[in-house]
């Protein structure tokens, strides 16, 4: 009796295994990515969707930072390097190649009632480093500016601080741990200023224009909105990618991937 | 047959007990192993008494004195507000309140205990923080004060419930004796019942301290979370929130340092637990006399 049950079970297991195996028409192999922690969300989503389509592919993402990721692809320890900045000239001269996957626009937000609707990049850095402390200095109502930032290690914070050149120099009143918290706090305090990924900003707050350019998908794509950075895939020029890695790159630029990238809060590159 | 069943059940209960002990051991060992290396690397004095925390800066600094002081001040403040309110509520409910009131308030208190901390945080963030901003004419209301008020409310149930149990357990004959000797009702309750229930009330207070120092979520939503040295109206970061806010993206020494903060917090909680045991043991002795 016991043997019979065992036999039936084994057959069932084999059948299921066969079904799973036979169902996949995709490629086999490894896709190793390494780099920017800011790209965690978008690469995670793409990797998940890609693995679902190609169950035989082993997809890995190592969140180390843009610099490490670029070095890793150069040394050949990963297939694709991830960088949240453009390659420097010296990196390009080493034979590396970049492909812009998406653009990350960071909106600077203030309360609905705030009369200040336009700031320059310099004014924004001055606010965040504590040089400007009152809205009246910017032509607004008298009121101490309440500077809201994100926690150390956040990708949005890293992006914002590197573009506004305020790294390690920010004087914050509140450090919050999610985009939603930042928006809720700015909404409830008319003197607050904060930043968040453009995709998550809703109409309860005002996204100020930077140097006269209002943030939108279009102004990010044509490069006129200043607070943005590219998310790039870094590869070695002239070196053929493995079939699985090439399939992943192709997938990232397919029409199918666009809504996934969109959902991760960044604008797909054209 | 009965004897076999007996043995099986005994083994099962023993196993349950061992699981608990194993959990505590694993957590303790894990925390010590993962917390000590960073302390050694940063230097214990620099770590515990450094006043700057900048974990992701070019030149990172890992001083947790602001967190330690904030946790101590915050807990102390919560006790300062929560204990008198909780104590008098307990005396009223145990000795003076009519049966109906006692039932209703008792129900509300236990409801207060079961509200998730994120809800306390949300109410604090949407109601208390703007209120503090208006009342004190501040630029922003997220502050140590907001955290203290939220914590004070959160520790009320443990203080009230434990104190009521202690007060209810005071033998009726003590109170009868005092009343018979001509003491008024209030003299009886505050000079006889309360001293007799002293150790139980203290236990409630210590439990409250434990809850306040270990709370992360509610505090994170109202305190502002910037690693400043504590100021009543300033943005502050507790030991718990320092770990919680950075853990999700941390790496390398930063992550290890977060474990070290958790270890420091763990030591604090252990000390509080020891204090609790001591208080309870003291209580048992006085009752025996």
Image (spheres, helix red, strand yellow):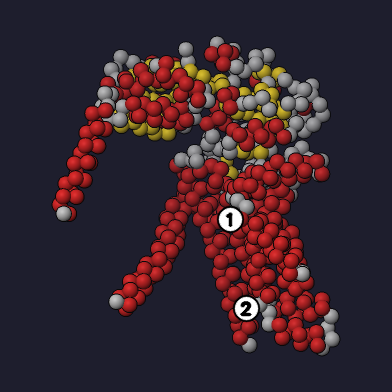
Q: Secondary structure at mark 2?
A: helix
Q: Residue furthest front?
A: A1
Chain under numbered label 1: B
Q: Residue at x 63, y 28 (%)?
A: A195
Looking at marks 1 and 2 on the same chain, the residue that comes earlier in the sequence is marked by: 1
Q: Residue at x 22, y 33 (%)?
A: A18
Gap in Å between the C-alphas at discs 1 and 2?
25 Å
Mark 1, residue position: B214
Q: Position of residue B49 (x, y in %)?
A: 59, 53
Q: Position of residue A93 (x, y in %)?
A: 38, 16
Q: Residue at x 79, y 80 (%)?
A: B188
Q: Secondary structure at mark 1?
A: helix
Within 10 Å of disc 1 (Cα), the crowding (few <14, some 14-19, many 20+) is many
Mark 2, residue position: B283
Circle 1/circle 2 CB separation < 8 Å: no
Chain under numbered label 2: B
Q: Which of the two residues, B120 or B173, is positioned nearer the viewer here?
A: B173
Is residue A99 among what the camera can see? no
Say which quadrant the N terminus of chain A sits in: bottom left
Determine whether, in the image, residue B153 is placed left or right of residue B20: right
Up-down: is A12 above or below A26?
A: below
Q: Residue at x 35, y 22 (%)?
A: A248
Is residue A134 among what the camera can see? yes
The lab-note entry on whether marks 1 and 2 share a chain reads yes
Q: Locate residue A170: give its quadrant.
A: top right
Q: Position of residue A69 (x, y in %)?
A: 40, 28
């Amino acid at each position: 009796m016991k043997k019979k049950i065992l036999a039936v079970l084994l057959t069932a297991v084999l059948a299921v295994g066969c079904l799973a195996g036979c169902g996949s028409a995709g490629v086999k192999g490894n896709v190793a990515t390494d780099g920017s922690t800011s790209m965690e969300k978008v690469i995670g989503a793409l990797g998940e969707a890609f693995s679902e389509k190609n169950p035989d592919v082993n997809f890995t993402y190592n969140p180390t930072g843009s610099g490490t990721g670029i070095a890793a692809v150069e040394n050949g320890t990963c297939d694709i390097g991830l960088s949240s900045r453009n390659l420097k000239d010296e990196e390009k001269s080493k034979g590396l190649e970049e492909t812009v996957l998406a653009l990350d626009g960071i909106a600077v937000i203030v309360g609905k009632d705030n009369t200040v609707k336009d700031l320059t990049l310099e004014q924004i850095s001055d606010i965040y480093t504590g040089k400007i402390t009152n809205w009246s200095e910017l032509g607004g109502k008298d009121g101490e500016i309440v500077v809201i930032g994100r926690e150390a290690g956040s990708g949005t914070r890293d992006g914002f601080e590197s573009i506004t050149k305020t790294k390690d120099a920010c004087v914050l009143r509140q450090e919050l741990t999610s985009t939603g918290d930042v928006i809720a706090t700015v909404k409830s305090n008319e003197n607050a200023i904060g930043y968040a990924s453009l995709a998550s900003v809703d109409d309860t707050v005002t996204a100020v224009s930077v140097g006269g350019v209002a943030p939108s998908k279009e102004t990010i794509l044509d490069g006129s909105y200043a607070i943005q950075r590219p998310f790039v895939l870094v590869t070695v020029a002239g070196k053929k990618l493995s079939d699985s890695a090439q399939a992943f790159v192709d997938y990232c630029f397919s029409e199918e991937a666009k809504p996934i990238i969109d959902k991760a809060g960044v604008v797909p590159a054209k | 047959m009965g004897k076999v069943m007996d043995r099986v059940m005994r083994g099962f209960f023993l196993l349950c007990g061992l699981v608990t002990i194993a959990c505590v051991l694993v957590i303790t060992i894990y925390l010590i192993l993962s917390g000590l290396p960073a302390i050694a690397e940063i230097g214990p004095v620099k770590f515990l008494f450094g006043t700057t925390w900048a974990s992701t800066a070019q030149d990172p600094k890992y001083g947790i004195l602001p967190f330690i002081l904030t946790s101590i001040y915050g807990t102390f403040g919560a006790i300062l507000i929560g204990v008198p309110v909780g104590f008098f509520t307990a005396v009223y409910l145990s000795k003076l309140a009519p049966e109906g009131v006692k039932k209703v308030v008792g129900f509300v208190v236990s409801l207060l205990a079961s509200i998730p901390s994120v809800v306390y945080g949300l109410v604090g963030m949407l109601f208390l923080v703007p209120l503090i901003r208006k009342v004190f004419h501040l630029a922003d209301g997220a502050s140590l004060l907001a955290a203290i008020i939220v914590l004070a409310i959160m520790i009320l149930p443990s203080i009230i419930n434990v104190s009521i149990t202690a007060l209810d357990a005071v033998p009726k004959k003590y109170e009868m004796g005092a009343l018979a000797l001509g003491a008024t009702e209030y003299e009886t309750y505050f000079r006889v019942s309360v001293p007799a229930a002293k150790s139980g009330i203290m236990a409630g207070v210590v439990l409250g301290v434990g809850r306040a120092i270990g709370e992360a979520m509610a505090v994170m939503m109202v305190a502002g979370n910037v690693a400043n040295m504590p100021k009543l109206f300033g943005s502050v970061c507790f030991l718990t929130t320092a770990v919680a806010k950075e853990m999700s993206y941390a790496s390398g020494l930063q992550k290890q340092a977060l474990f070290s903060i958790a270890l420091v917090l763990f030591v604090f909680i252990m000390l509080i637990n020891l204090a609790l045991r001591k208080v309870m043991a003291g209580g048992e002795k006085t009752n025996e006399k």
